[in-house]
């Protein structure tokens, strides 16, 4: 099974991943999406092709009874449309989010070197977070943001007709605004176990 934790920068994905690593969740490999390496000219096409690489890795581990938790910027609908995603035993998504003011404060604490190295400005991270909130709720929330360009092998038709409230579009939301990192890790660990149980029971 592949567990996707997605969210705009500043939501706490990296810190939560580190906290989960320290706990050693059984039969679960934890990965940051950017472990593959991010080229200077990374764009939507690059991200979508990297999604497929992660899906294939998860498929290989599934054969050995190991799940993958992947944390990054990949929206749920984008991973669902990866060419090989239909071969997974299960795919579950969680949006890790926080208030915009908290996000901006966290990003500023990363320092000027980080701010100068990333493309765009801080308002772009806020806008991306806002889009992700809509996407987590409704598959028809401005889908052109991820579908307008990119890898032509993407299988958007898998969810093109789904609407808000469809049981197949079920994204857990964890708000890290007022949580410590261990509390965020608690919430993610509980989500993983809940989803594993649902998968085992056929739900």
Image: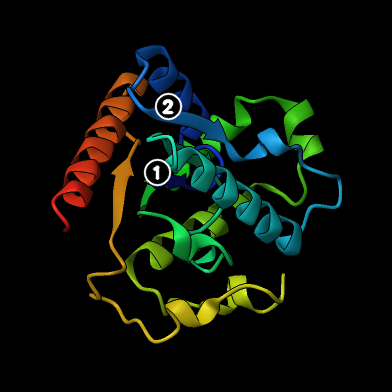
Which corner quadrant of the image does residue 133 belong to?
bottom left
Q: Quadrant of the C terminus?
A: bottom left
Q: Residue furthest bottom?
A: 161
Category of crowding for the residue at label 2, using alpha-carbon neighbours closer than 10 angstroms: few (below 14), some (14–19), many (at least 20): many
Give coordinates of residue 183: x percent, y percent.
27, 24
In the picture provided, is 84 more to the left or to the right than 167?
Answer: right
Taking depth in this image into account, of 178 and 13 the one nearest to the observer is 13
In the picture provided, is 124 more to the left or to the right than 191?
Answer: right
Q: Is residue 4 above or below residue 131?
A: above
In the picture provided, is 184 more to the left or to the right than 190?
Answer: right
The answer to which of marks 2 and 1 sits earlier in the sequence is 2
Give coordinates of residue 58: x percent, y percent.
51, 44
Give coordinates of residue 69: x percent, y percent.
44, 38
Residue 73 visible in the shown view = no
Category of crowding for the residue at label 1, using alpha-carbon neighbours closer than 10 angstroms: few (below 14), some (14–19), many (at least 20): many
Which numbered tag is attached to residue 145?
none
Q: Are marks 2 and 1 in contact (CB under 8 Å)?
A: yes
Q: Residue furthest left?
A: 201
Q: Is residue 56 above or below residue 127?
A: above
Which corner quadrant of the image does residue 89 belong to?
bottom left
Which numbered tag is attached to residue 96?
1
Helix, strand or loop for disc 1 = strand
How does the figure colour the protein chain or chains? rainbow
Give coordinates of residue 50: x percent, y percent.
68, 52
Helix, strand or loop for disc 2 = helix
Taking depth in this image into account, of 70 and 119 the one nearest to the observer is 70
Q: Residue furthest front?
A: 63
Picture residue at 50% right of the left edge, 78% below the top = 142
| Residue underneath mark 2 | 16
């Amino acid at each position: 099974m592949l567990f996707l934790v997605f969210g705009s920068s500043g939501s706490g994905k990296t810190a939560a991943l580190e906290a989960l690593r320290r706990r050693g969740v059984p039969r679960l490999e934890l990965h940051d999406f950017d472990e593959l390496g991010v080229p200077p000219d990374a764009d939507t096409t690059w991200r979508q092709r990297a999604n497929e690489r992660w899906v294939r890795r998860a498929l290989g581990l599934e054969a050995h009874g190991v799940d993958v938790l992947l944390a990054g910027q990949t929206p749920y609908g984008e991973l669902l449309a990866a060419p090989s995603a239909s071969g997974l035993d299960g795919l579950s998504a969680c949006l890790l989010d926080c208030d915009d003011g908290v996000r901006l404060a966290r990003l500023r604490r990363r320092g000027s070197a980080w701010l100068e190295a990333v493309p765009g400005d801080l308002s772009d991270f806020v806008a991306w977070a806002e889009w992700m909130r809509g996407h987590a709720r409704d598959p028809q929330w401005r889908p052109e943001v991820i579908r307008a360009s990119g890898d032509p092998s993407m299988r958007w038709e898998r969810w093109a007709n789904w609407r808000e409230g469809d049981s197949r579009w079920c994204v857990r939301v964890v708000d890290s605004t007022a949580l410590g990192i261990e509390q965020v890790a608690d919430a993610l660990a509980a989500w993983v176990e809940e989803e594993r149980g649902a998968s085992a029971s056929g739900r």
